[in-house]
Every structure is written in C-alpha cells, then in structure tokens.
C-alpha cells in the first residue's frame, strides 16, 4: 500500500528503505509487533471488543438505516465474529447473520470498495503514516452511497457466479 500510494511499481526497482524514508515511516518490523498489519486499530479483536463495536456502532447505524425493517448482517469468519458470545449477542438482539463461506473475496463487496479507494488515491502522495490514514479516510468518505448500494445489490449475481464457477474465481 505504501509503494502504491507513492506511485512506485515493482518495475521501478526502488529499495524499500528509500520508500520508507520518502514516506517518513520506519521498518514494518519496528512498527508492528505482531504478524498482522494494523490499520485503524487491531485487526484481530477479542469477542468482547467486537461485541462493544456491534453494540455501540453497528446496531445504532442499522437502526437508523433500516428503522423497523429486517436486515441481514454480513461479516467474515474472524474468530471474534464466530465466538459463541458474539453469536449469542447477535441472536439476543435479533440480528440475522448471512452464512458466509471461508475465503470468498468474490462475494465481499468491501474488496471492490478498497479497489475504488486505491484507484482514487493513485495520484495522492502522503508524506507519512498520518497523512496516509487521513487520505484513506477522506477518499473513503468521497465514495457515494449509491456506489455502495450498487455493490450490495450485485450480491445475487455474485453468488450465482461463484456457484456457476464451482468456487473458482469470478469476474467479481
């Protein structure tokens, strides 16, 4: 992502040290003490943290968006999402969850949104990690709700394509 945001391709043969110096960020190993790259917080959350997010952010947003209408919540198979306590909380709050196959990027519209963010950021040149975060947030906020809706309404076609391809990659 850092190389991409600086407009550097693999063909440019520029050393990582130069890239990190240009963006004023240290070695990844110095910044991240785990095997996972973190963005705005932890990638791997405990179920109790995830339930707090659901309670304080997801549920109020869903209530505002859908009012009294039923909705189906989509999440991946991260351990916090599949924990018994999370399943129980979702059930207790009447939140229906979409059954989700493992490793299914073709079915995940968020991957398309990240692609849109990357394309929109192609000519941006953040100078450090804080500018990069701010640029990503700004770019994300610029995506119109209609574009998100279009991706969501493509789900039946996505599912059909994955079934037709017998789980192999699709155009999505």
Image: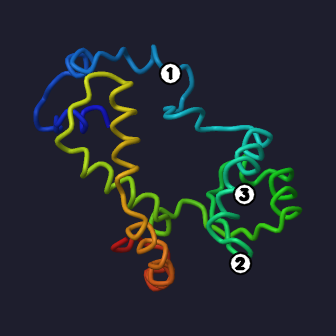
Task: Give how far across and how far down residue 77 sits, in percent.
Answer: 65, 56
Q: Quadrant of residue 164?
A: bottom left
**Are dots 3 and 1 in contact, CB under 8 Å?**
no
Report the mark closest to the observer, 2 or 1: 2
Disc 3 and disc 1: Cα gap in Å? 31 Å
Instruction: Write the residue at 49% across / 64% down.
Output: 108
Residue 57 % position (x, y): 67, 49
Q: As displayed, is residue 57 above or below residue 130?
A: below
116, above or below 138, in the image: below
User: Mark 3, mark 1: which one is toward the viewer?
Assistant: 3
Q: Quadrant of residue 1?
A: top left
Please, what secondary structure does the residue beneath circle 3 have? helix
The residue that appears at 45% across and 18% down in the rendered structure is 29
Return the residue at label 3: 59
Task: Classify mark 1: helix, strand or loop.
Answer: loop
Q: Residue furthest left?
A: 12
- Give the labeled residue for mark 1: 32
Q: Residue tagged by mark 2?
A: 69
């Amino acid at each position: 992502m850092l190389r991409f945001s600086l407009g550097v391709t693999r063909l440019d043969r520029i050393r990582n040290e130069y890239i990190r110096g240009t963006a004023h960020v240290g070695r990844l190993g110095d910044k991240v003490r785990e095997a996972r790259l973190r963005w705005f917080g932890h990638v791997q959350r405990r179920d109790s943290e995830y339930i707090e997010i659901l309670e304080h952010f997801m549920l109020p947003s869903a209530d505002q968006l859908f009012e009294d209408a039923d909705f189906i919540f989509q999440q991946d198979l991260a351990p916090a999402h599949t924990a018994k306590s999370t399943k129980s909380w979702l059930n207790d709050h009447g939140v229906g969850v979409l059954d989700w196959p493992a490793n299914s990027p073709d079915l995940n519209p968020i991957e398309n949104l990240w692609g849109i963010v990357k394309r929109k950021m192609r000519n941006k040149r953040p100078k450090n990690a804080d500018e990069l975060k701010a640029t990503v947030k700004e770019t994300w906020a610029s995506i119109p709700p209609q574009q998100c809706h279009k991706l969501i309404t493509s789900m039946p076609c996505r599912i059909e394509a994955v079934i037709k391809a017998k789980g192999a990659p699709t155009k999505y």
